[in-house]
Image (cartoon, coloured by chain):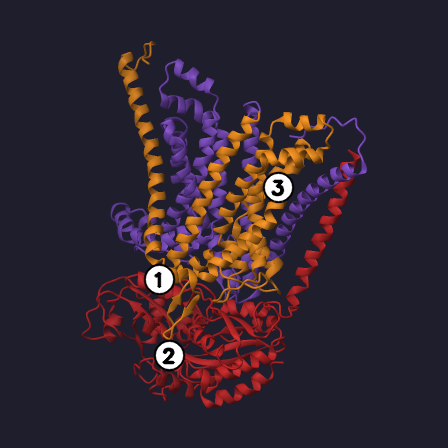
Chain colours: A red, B orange, C purple
Amino acid sequence: MRKTWRLLAVSLAVGAVAAGAAACGSSSSSSGSSSGSTTSGSSSVLVGAGSTFVAPLVSQWEAAYVKTPAAVTITYGAVGSGGGVDAVTARSVDFGASDAPLTSDQVTACKSCVQIPWALGATTVDYNVKGAPNNLKLTGKVLADIFLGNIKQWNDPAIAALNPGVNLPSTHITPIYRSDGSGTSFVFTDYLSSVDPDWASKVGTSTQPTFPVGTGAEHSSGVIAAMQATDGGITYAETSYIAADNLDYALIQNAAGQYPKPTNSAVLAAAAVGTTRSDGTIKLVDPPASASAAYPLASYTYVIVPESSPKASTLRAFITWAISSAGQSLGEPIGYPPLPANVVSSNAMLIAKIK
Amino acid sequence: MSSVVTSPFGSPSRRSRRRKMVGRMMEALCTLAALAAMAVLILVVYAVFRRGASALNLNLVTEVPSTDAYGNTTGGIKNSIIGTVIITGIATLIAVPFGILIAIFNAEFASRRTADAIRLVLNLLAGVPTIVVGVFIFGLLVVGHGYSAYAAAVALSIVMVPIIARSTEEVLALVPAQLREGGMALGATRARTVVTIILPTAVGGMVTATILAIARAAGETAPILLTCSIFANQVTLDPRQAMGSLPMTIYLDAEQPSQYAQHQAWAAALILMAFVLVAAIAGRLLSLRSRRRIEQTR
Amino acid sequence: MSVQPATSSLPLTRRTRFGEIGLRGICGAAVVILVVVIAMLIWEVAHGAWLSFSTFGLGFITSTDWNVVTNQFGALYLLEGTLLTSVFALIIAVPTAIAIGLFLSELAPRVLRTPVGLMVELLAAIPSVILGLWGIVVLGPFVATEVEPWLNQHLGFIPLFSGYPSNAGVLPACLILTIMMIPIIASISRELFNSVPSELKQGALALGATRWEVMRQIAIPQVSGGLIAAVMLGFARAIGEAIAVAQVIGSHNASPFGSIFKPAATMASWIATQFNGTATDLQRSSLYYLAVILLVISLVTNIAAQLIVNRFRKRIGGRA
């Protein structure tokens, strides 16, 4: 009997030590003590995560950058902007990507991270309605009413008024939105809040807004898939999906009353009149009427990098390449017009902060 | 089987006929229920086989995923297959020793009350939702260190240990007492008896338990979702890195709009399900055989 | 199972004594580590939930908000979704599973018992993510185009069956949970029915009972304790299912009692979809709070099931 108790005491001691060691290991972790934790320590790999908006472009960069003399392999997880910010805050990735500027909470949590706009793109409103043609015209207010649940059917008078002569079916409208933390949701709700005070008070702007009606799905790919499976579905995602999946998309009226298609030039027109927010990021949605050809739902998308990183030089080199014409030219065919020159030059200062 | 007692419900033969009819109806319902369950199983398995087989080609298992110039998914799932093997392998290496040692403790060294308490703890652990296990390991191993195959393996091993421990304890209990007593009578210590006599007799059952636990762990998605979900589109062999896995690939590809990605999901589902079903069948058949064998030693 | 050793009368050499201590020590250490891991699990999850718990207290359970913009979080709709989907699945799964258990232990020709039993267990082995994939591609559209319109047409006056058909919603989630719970409860019930002493059954038959009456009046009451425990275990499994539910339920924070055609969410599916991308610390902590609630429910259910089994075992004289 005594032997058993002695053995149990020893085992308990061993177990306690093990638990203590594990607990110590985990408690010191959140203060960013990861040095090269995500990889074997070599800087020939960069791991990133975040925005699905920029994911098609990052894929192109992945394929091209590994062939450059730098020969760095980029791993990117398209988990959504929210996930990207989370991951880079926890230092479980080398860089995060988000279409939404960091909130003040996130800035504090990330502990000196720099956000650099590294691509320019557009969010389009895509729909799947049997019997309705492509390029239906919608205004921002009508779009807000659809996603608020005030407009329930495709042949609603408000939609019919904007599309005279078009035969609209009576199909029920199913708004489909991003259920995960999404920069695209931020851009979309930022636009709706700008054009509809009702939306601003009821829902507001966020990466994870509480949509009053509809179905949630994860990631841009998820909302597109859900929309394709739902007759009457409408959702929002980046431009590249239109060509890739042959989608019907809506023409959104801008402040000048025009209905521009989300082409590269329309996005660049919006970028030319962007306004700077208090946190230094640039807002491109709902451009003023002076930009008559501007697409109303354009946005920059950001790469978020810790200012002090064990892979600083690799990161600086990669981001510099990505915002250069070499990187940006890969985006032009798939809906990401090149960054304006002034943004590229102001980025240099931000990139220099990464040490 | 006619009732011989008269009753106010009518003549005995009529009442017995009614009882027989009710009986047969209920029996038919039970049979229907069993057939319905089998039908669902066949439906699902058939769907996976049909869609998966049509998508399965050599490319799928020899290439890694990639995106073409238009942003469409192409390529294969080689990295996920290898990733599942590595993650499940490490989880097995962790879980099997723990499970067996706990079972031996319960069967050989613990008093009845302690054994009951440990069995309760094992049942509680088995009942914890796998998403909560994922949340736990996320806080413990992922925060600050990143997603890794190790974290996923540890999370899966937590799911596997109760399965292995419970089944092993059952098998150890089946070993006849004569073998134990015989060993003692020959002067062997408890430890030696366990290691040289009891364990070899029970080894069939332990193998079965391991196979069933592997089948279960290979299909778990929730723990991997929170510990190893951002991974490279290439084969990684280093467990300190994140790597792909079949459940994550299915989960992520299932929601993709592109037909190609959906095909990939079905193909991955086919591979995973074939593995799980084969392991489950093998486990059950082995367990029947090893039980018969142990009973023969009585 | 501890046969206390008739301690050997031969003197233990140092080597054999070391082997003895060694084995006992390692086994004991493994058990201790098991307990430590569970303690760490509870601590880690509770620690993460602390921020949310101290902000909202128990009001979290009665609040319906989940708003990242205003930083208000509440679990009521998620709780409703969890309960509705699990109870619905239980209502369909339990009678079906008991029927299958009876079939496998009493009705099936002996030759079929092993193969059919194997098939039922294989259904339990199908990974939930594959069921979810099948749910997205096959079940969801089928429900939206056939089942929901039919329900709406014939039972649409009940609010639960009102609304516009959708292929992502509560109903597909309920059906998938049903499919997952049936084999779990069925295999336990089969073992229970197999354990009913044959003397009881023979006696009843000899007294003139039909086979069904034997099942209903002898077998089921005999194993009722075990059946209740099996149901509770199935319930615990259903509320914890995150992946398959997340794939088909539509991830919408709304009350499922409005209509089972509409999208909703359960606590487990909400954690799965939101965890990898929270915007605020309070949101992340609220997800941990959900995990705590799930943990508490599963622990309580499992303990209750264990108590029922123990009492039931005592009642029939200690037979397993």
C-alpha separation, residue under disc 2 versus residue under disc 1: 22 Å
Observer-nearest residue: A337 or C268?
Answer: A337
Q: Residues within 10 Å of mark 2 (few under 14, many from 20)?
A: many
Mark toward the viewer: 3 or 2? 3
Q: Can you say which quadrant of the picture contains the N terminus of chain C? A: top right
Q: Mark 3: which amino acid?
A: Ile
C-alpha separation, residue under disc 1 versus residue under disc 3: 46 Å
The chain containing the residue under callout 3 comes to B
Q: What element carries label 3?
A: helix
Q: Are marks 2 and 1 in contact (CB under 8 Å)?
A: no
Answer with the quarter of the image where residue A179 lies: bottom left
State the residue position of label 2: A335
Q: How crowded is mark 1: few (under 14 residues within 10 Å), some or many (20 or more)?
A: many
Residue A200 in the image, given as x and y percentages of width and height: 43, 72
Give the residue drawn at x 42%, y 69%.
Answer: B66
State the residue position of label 1: A226
Residue B71, relative to residue C175: is it above or below? below
Res A177 seen here: no
C-alpha separation, residue under disc 3 versus residue under disc 2: 57 Å
Mark toward the viewer: 2 or 1? 2
Q: Mark 1: which amino acid?
A: Ala
Answer with the quarter of the image where residue B99 lies: top right
Q: Mark 2: which amino acid?
A: Gly
Which label was assigned to residue A177?
none
Q: How crowded is mark 3: few (under 14 residues within 10 Å), some or many (20 or more)?
A: many
State the residue position of label 3: B100
Q: Is mark 2 on a helix, strand or loop?
A: loop
Query: Is label 3 on the same chain as label 2?
Result: no
